Image (cartoon, rainbow, N blue to C red):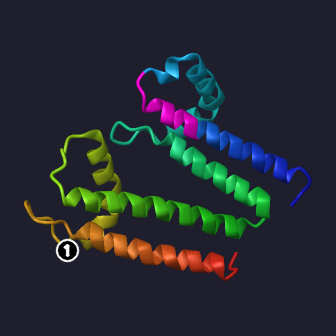
Amino acid sequence: MFPGASLIVTLINLFILVLIVRAILSWFPGMLYTQAGRYVLLATEWYLAPIRRVIPPVGGLDISFLVGIIILYALAAFIGSGNLVATLILIVGYALVFIIILLLVRIFFGFFRMDPWHPITQMIMQSTEPFARPFRGRFPRRPGQFDWAPVAAFVVVLVVYLFVESLGRFGIG
């Protein structure tokens, strides 16, 4: 690690905390328009605006802060370790965990009659369908029946995640 790396990693972690505060404030109507909310917006918009241009809101939900946090975690990991391969393994692991969570939410939705027009339901369905689609031939979607394709996708993505984690654990990278 180079001199000053721990200070940079600390600053990155503080900025991640500010991004999390912004996300929490956005859940409460009007909170971003308070004095504290304006400071948080001012501190984060310069970073999130370019990400939002590349990754627009999905299903009406702005996920730029999640992408921004993952980028910052990866940057902090690279600065802390100086190992590019280990950092790439870490990024892939984060992405796989995010996909696993989305697939679990979709499986959970399968047990309940969720409003298909709700923005969150649409975002979950749209973002997980590319992972479920390869299993549609084996598990076709039938109205009124449980959708098994996301379960199969979950199992496969979980196995891939465990493999990637084992690469990181056994020192590859």
> Camera-side residue: 102 or 135?
102
Q: Which residues are magenta?
A: 20-29
146 lies left or right of 1:
left
Q: Nearer the viewer, residue 43 or 55?
A: 43
Q: Is residue 98 magenta?
A: no
Residue at left 64%, top 75%? Answer: 168
Give the crowd class for mark 1: few <14, some 14-19, many >=20 residues within 10 Å. Answer: few
Tell me the residue that label 1 is attached to.
137
Q: Is residue 72 above or below residue 25?
A: below
Q: Pinpoint residue 90: horizontal percent, then vertical percent.
A: 62, 65
The residue lying at 58 percent from left, 44 percent from top is: 68
Number of numbered discs on residues? 1
Asked if residue 101 lies left or right of residue 109, the reply is right
Q: Amino acid at mark 1?
A: Gly
- Residue 23 is a magenta residue: yes
Vertical relation: 39 (above or below) 122: above
State the predominant SS element of the stretch in magenta: helix
Q: Residue at x 54, y 47 (%)?
A: 67
Looking at the picture, tell me which residue is in the foreground, 106 or 34: 34
Nearer to the camera, 2 or 35: 35
**Residue most extreme to the left:** 144
What x and y, as percent, mark residue 22? 55, 33
Residue 128's x, y, as percent? 33, 58
In-image side of 170 versus 106 (left or right): right
Q: At 34% from the left edge and 65% from the top edge, which residue is drawn?
A: 131
Dot 1: what SS? Answer: loop
Viewport quadrant of the N terminus: bottom right
Residue positioned most to the bottom = 170
- State whether residue 36 is above or below residue 101: above
User: From the image, which quarter does the C terminus lie in?
Assistant: bottom right
Picture coordinates of residue 123 (x, y %)?
A: 32, 47
